[in-house]
Amino acid sequence: MKKSWIFLLAASFILPFMLFFTAPLSFYFGNINDIEFSLLEVIFPLTGLFLALSLIFSLLLYFLWSRPKSFNIMAGFLVGFAVAIWIQSQLFAWKFGLLDGQDIDWTQWKIQMWIEAVVWLIVLASVILIFFRGKDKLKKIILQALFLLGFLSIAISFISAPSKIKKVYVQKDIDDVFFFHEKNNILVILLDGFQSDYFDLIRKEYPEEVSFLDGFTFYKNTISHYPTTAPSIPAIVSGKLYKNQEVFDDFFRDSVSNCDLQQYYQKKGYNSKILGVYPRYLMIKDIFTNFSFTIVSPVIKFLDYGIFRCSPTIFKKNIYNKGAWFLSFWEKKGYPPAEYGRDIRFVELFEKQATINADNKVGTFKFIHFFTPHFPVCIDENLHYDPALGGPGGYIRQTRGALVLAQRILKKLQDLNLYDNSEIVIMADHGTLAMPPISPVIGRVPKKVRSSALALLLHKPPLAKGELVVNDIPLYNSDLGCLLNVKNQHLDYAGFDSAKNGQERLRTFLFYDWNDDWERDYIPDMTEYIVSGPAYKGESWQLGSHMYTSKGNINTSSKNHYAIDQKIEFTVAGKSGNYVLGGWCNQESDHRWTDGKIAGMHFQLPKRQQKNLVLALKCSGYLASGKIDHQKVNVLINGQKVAEWIVKGDHWHEAAIPKNLVHNGLVNVLFQVSNPASPSELEQINDPRMLGMAVTELVIREKN
């Protein structure tokens, strides 16, 4: 091609543009509320890196300018690489989870890896071939289109980014974190995901590591209400329980703004702070913006985000795995990665900054939420990073490390002569889901249900002294307010008092599997479990009779309960028998026939269902080897005709269910079949049944 400085510069700039701007900005805007630095902190160094790499590529192309074939191959390689990066960062941005994942099972992404490998090879080969043999006009169009796509991707990422949550703190809030009253202090240390039966093991096998718990009681028989942090925090700080009764963000906002512990103690005149993991509270990462030291510079983090976003999935585990970023790892100055290093830095800062402040006239309440010892397992009992850790042994070492964090906080209180008078709680929001319960008893519920419920709870009243005491009364971790004698109408004082008095206390636990397919405004469907007795024993657990969904409360004790979008298969392994009434034949291997002119079904839907529905049925008609043309089927919902089907071959048919026909969630369905017939009469087969239609699948969904 003819020598063109514009073409040379465009070919030199396109790859750095994708690498330093398009890919990382897409990641940045998509995770804006989880990133603790602003673009102003990275834009100038990033621009310098962009210009430096562009200059290197420009010099390389200029050096090859006199050799057209080599020039075109190199230009094609740079542009082809930029095209592949755009495709990877924009079209292959798979959902790995928060910040693209904490501990990703990369084996589940093999199909995507193969797809990416094929696309990368095709793109690189095609673009290099075009630049080697194609026309100049086509090359220019490719470059122009690629720059346009890059800018559009940045713009779309910016427009579609979630709203930046406003800061809820001022400088005084940060200062107050480290200020204490000379006598009256309440401190809650939450260690995220600390499974209580593993603490029980640690106190037995490593007694010297729990000897710092002077005056504490270990409430061994404590459970959380939920298996994850999101709904557990409102339950702990406010006593309010979430059962998918409303959009979760609305519920959380109401809980933390009207009746939480921070508000309660503030009204009493305390210096009150909840240092949490949610943006509506002061966050640990916010503390560091006011102090000089940092683990990793924002530019390094930003580059890590871009490299992760634009790299093929097969390489991603080398860039981000178990919370460790590739470039950040080398700059982190001896701290473990991600939240673990953040926790350690905070404790170090606490040891330096905590002091008694005479301005605190009444007292202080501090609630500090540490991420440690939450999964993934990657730090040991000395708080050193070890990515080889795993299994129960690794988790035990990580929980021992979490206890070190708590011990150092309490040691600082002792240095300030505040420990004895302080009321202190060390607790967890939930168990682990992943670690098997230590109890050897085989229970009646899945092990992950029990393990996710066993939440640590340790309490030291003011002036309490002596070795660690074990107490087996049945508590929730949401009894925190009761332990602290907080006056709040949402707290279960009746249950708490009965537990203290040695009476039986039936407790409920709402379990759900957290995944990327749930309806974001609500928690995934919650299944109720009942605990009667010690929670750490499997025989104390049984399945409850309720499921809480985004559509409402389902009574699971009734066999005909039905969740919207649930597919019913009319097979031997299916559950059509829970829903069919009269007019049906016995279940066959892969279908069920209607028998006679009328066949009925009944469904108990969630009672809060407020939308029009559609019943979809996959079926075929009995046509007697061509002797019957079709079956006409009228569909009645709660006595009213809503559809008329002509049923021949195996196809899907639909019937509308207006919401005004559904009362208290009950849906009765009648199928009126026009021409049921007996094979023994029409086909000389020994089958006297009056067959109408053979049904294979059914689903009820919301109408679009």
Image (spheres, rainbow, N blue to C red):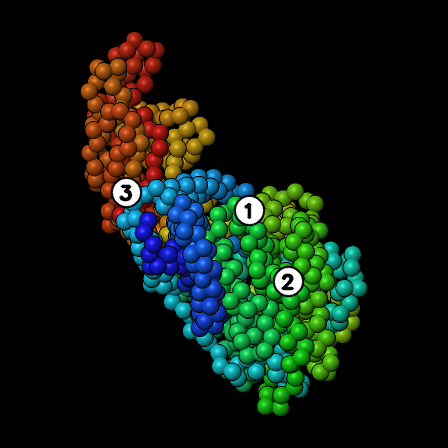
Q: Residue at x 50, y 47 (%)?
A: 313
Occupied quadrant, residue 649: top left
Residue at 38% from the left image edge and 38% from the top image edge: 567
Q: Is residue 501 visible?
A: no
Q: Secondary structure at mark 2?
A: loop
In the picture, the disc for residue 585 is none
Q: Amino acid at mark 2?
A: Pro
Image x and y of residue 42, in percent? 47, 69
Q: What's the distance in space between the residues labelled 1 and 2, CA to CA?
A: 21 Å
Measured along the vertical axis of the image, is residue 74 above or below residue 265?
above
The residue where tag 2 is placed is 336
Residue placed most toward the observer, 292 or 310: 310
Name which residue lies at 46% across and 76% down: 168
Q: Position of residue 427 (x, y in %)?
A: 63, 65
289 sits to left or right of 551: right
Residue topped by disc 3: 614
N-term mark: 1 or 2 = 1
Q: Quadrant of residue 619?
A: top left
Q: Where is mark 1, residue-wise?
A: 105
Q: First in sequence: mark 3 or mark 2? A: 2
- Give the label, 1 or 2, closer to the camera: 2
Q: Secondary structure at mark 1?
A: loop
Q: Hey, what amino acid is under mark 3? A: Val
Which label's residue is closer to the chain start, 3 or 1? Answer: 1
**Where does the image place residue 237, in percent across and percent down from the top left?**
53, 69
